[in-house]
Image: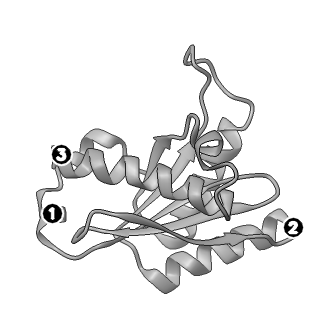
Amino acid sequence: MENKESFKKNKTLKETNNIILGFDFGTVKIGVAIGNTVSWKASPLKIIREKSSKMRLIVARNEVLYWDPVLIVVGVPRYKDDSTHPNAERCKKFANNISASTKKLVRLEDESYTSVLSDGKGDDDARAATLILQGALDEIFHTA
């Protein structure tokens, strides 16, 4: 996994058409979004609804292998006071597993309020993943 600072230094990212995937990890389902470095826009892709956590990880891994992104963004929840959310460690474990199984660069992104903002707008988890990914795309675009 990479931290934000080391990824910001990748100047070639703005010069090529790279796919970037975003994940909103949950213990029941995982939202997936896709974006690129041409439009710098994220869009909902799908929701992974497999019953077992092992199968959800396999399906997420297969999405990464299919799309072959240059970067994977995984949302990690925090409380307003910056204290650790109970699901944060699970999100980090998911990010580590995806990175290890695909050999892809993974960036952790604050997902505060994304589920609230996406609530009631169709496939909530995929919309939350879109908000997470768009936040990362915006930051990368303005700092790379």
Task: Compare marks 1 and 3 and give the one earlier in the sequence.
Answer: 1
- Answer left or right for 144 relative to 48: left
Crowd rating for badge 3 (residues with CA inside 10 Å; few <14, some 14–19, many 20+): few
Residue found 61% across the figure and 18% down from its top? 83
Figure quadrant of residue 55 = bottom right
Query: Between residues 81 and 89, which one lies in front from this camera angle?
Result: 81
Task: Compare marks 3 and 2 and give the one earlier in the sequence.
Answer: 2
Q: Which residue is mark 2?
A: 52
Q: In this rendering, is residue 92 above or below 28?
A: above
- Answer left or right for 1 relative to 88: left
Task: Compare marks 1 and 2 and give the one earlier in the sequence.
Answer: 1
- Label 3 residue SS: helix
Q: Are marks 1 and 2 in contact (CB under 8 Å)?
A: no
Residue found 57% across the figure and 78% down from its top? 63
Q: Which mark is residue 6?
A: none
Dot 2 amino acid type = Ser
Figure quadrant of residue 116 = top right
Q: CA distance from mark 3 to mark 2?
A: 38 Å
Residue that sits furthest to the right in the current view: 51
Residue 79 in view of the camera: yes
Q: Which mark is residue 142?
A: 3
Q: Are marks 1 and 3 in contact (CB under 8 Å)?
A: no
Q: Nearer the viewer, mark 3 or mark 2?
A: 3
- Label 2 residue SS: loop
Counting from the top left corner in percent of width and height, residue 95 is at 57, 54
Q: Which residue is mark 1?
A: 14
Q: CA distance from mark 1 to mark 3?
A: 10 Å
Counting from the top left corner in percent of width and height, residue 54 is at 80, 68
- Label 1 residue SS: helix
Q: In this rendering, is residue 78 above or below 93?
A: above
